Image: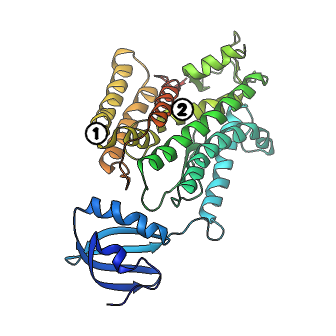
Amino acid sequence: MSEPRTGPPIDDVEDAFSVYEVETDGDALRYYGTPRSSGRAVMQELWPVFRERGYEVRLTREYGEWVLIAEPIEMGIDGIPWTNVVLFVLTVVSTLFAGSIWYHLDPFSPEIVHAWPFTAAIMGVLGIHELGHYALSRYHRVDASLPYFIPIPSYIGTMGAVIKMKGQIPSRKALFDIGVAGPLAGLVATIVVTVIGLHLPPVTAPESLIGDPDAVGIELGYPPLLEGLAWLVDQPLRYEDPATSVNPVVIGGWVGMFVTFLNMLPVGQLDGGHILRAILGESHERIAAFVPAVLFALSAYLYYVRDVPGNAAFLWAFWGLLALLFSFVGSATPIDDRELGTGRIAVGALTIVLGLLCFTPVPIRIVG
């Protein structure tokens, strides 16, 4: 049995995994053998060994044989990420279209470009949120993609943005840092955008829309964080004239808060799921199991007790279904599952509180 040319020597693997054959498969290495203990214990011992040699390793079973598959770690961007670029451009277009609605512009004319502050606000808060994840992924040497923006025809023009993490999470610390970096970075951007928007002039609907029985109105519910920022800078969120509303840049801040709250739901691969998994370990599943039920109950309460229109109440039913799906998929399992220190736990608790300040029972209501 020959030694691998680039991977860990067999002697460095033998204490945890008895090797009887090594194969080269392109750039990947395959160590066939028998685990000397549980799969998790083997990975905890061997993951750092392979990591030092520049490999990502996983233990699996193929055709009745145990095999360690080691693949070279690929960090950074290989070539032009065309998918990311195309989705970014499409989201710019979709948010310009949405922004034209808030500015009362004709979205099918060149004046749509005047909605750029709305687009800049939303793309900024979403992009900085995801770049927070990306930066900490790189710090912990976890391969991650650039943000994928998600365009969608709606009143905000997007369903947010995501990054894709590849490989395994080294430790609870890494899982926590990557999970918490997005909400904290995004909230900083959200607060800046909101304060700027509160100081910009409000917009007034044109006379042609005032009193039009066929006009559709959009009412936003303001979360405590937005209310608090408006009070702190002494700027109004509401106006006596019903045709006047806040500058659309404030709506960009509202989107940042709404996205932060949704991401902080403590289930599966959402940011809140990562943070709770890192803090509580495997026992986090006891809390995650209640999240879909709470969202379904909130939807029913709003619809049947508060008599909130279905387009607002059913939003939480939709997220209840998503939370149920995320729960089934499960959360990330770090290689090193040792507990976090008190400093990170305190930061996690603060982030959860900030996430709750971004919650409002009726985020958006369509009337008319």
Q: Within the image, what quadrant is residue 101 found in? A: top right
Question: Residue 346: percent from the left, percent from the top?
Answer: 48, 30
Quadrant containing the C terminus is top right
Q: Determine crowd level at label 2: few under 14, some 14-19, many 20+ residues with C-alpha closer than 10 A.
A: many
**Label 2 vs 1, first from the N-terminus:** 2
Q: In this figure, which residue is indicated by the disc labeled 1?
A: 283
Asked whether 14 or 138 is in front, the reply is 14
Tag 2 near tag 1, CB within 8 Å: no
Does the rendering let one see residue 254? yes
Q: Amino acid at mark 2?
A: Phe
Q: Considering only vertical position in the picture, is 74 above or below 146? A: below
Question: Residue 284: percent from the left, percent from the top?
Answer: 32, 38
What is the secondary structure assignment of the residue under circle 2? helix
Does the rendering let one see residue 203? no
Q: In this figure, which residue is indicated by the disc labeled 2?
A: 258
Q: Amino acid at mark 1?
A: Ser
What is the secondary structure assignment of the residue under circle 1? helix
Direction from residue 117 to residue 175 in the image, left or right: left
Direction from residue 366 to residue 9 in the image, left or right: left
Residue that lies at the very extreme toward the top in this rendered image? 240
Q: Considering only vertical position in the picture, is 300 above or below 108? A: above
Question: Residue 6: percent from the left, percent from the top?
Answer: 47, 81
Direction from residue 22 to residue 173 in the image, left or right: right
Question: Residue 27: percent from the left, percent from the top?
Answer: 47, 81
Q: Residue at x 37, y 21 (%)?
A: 303
Q: Considering only vertical position in the picture, is 125 above or below 207? A: below
Q: CA distance from mark 2 to mark 1?
A: 27 Å
Direction from residue 293 to residue 181 in the image, left or right: right
Quadrant containing the N terminus is bottom left
Q: Within the image, what quadrant is residue 45 found in? A: bottom left
Residue that lies at the very extreme toward the bottom in this rendered image? 1
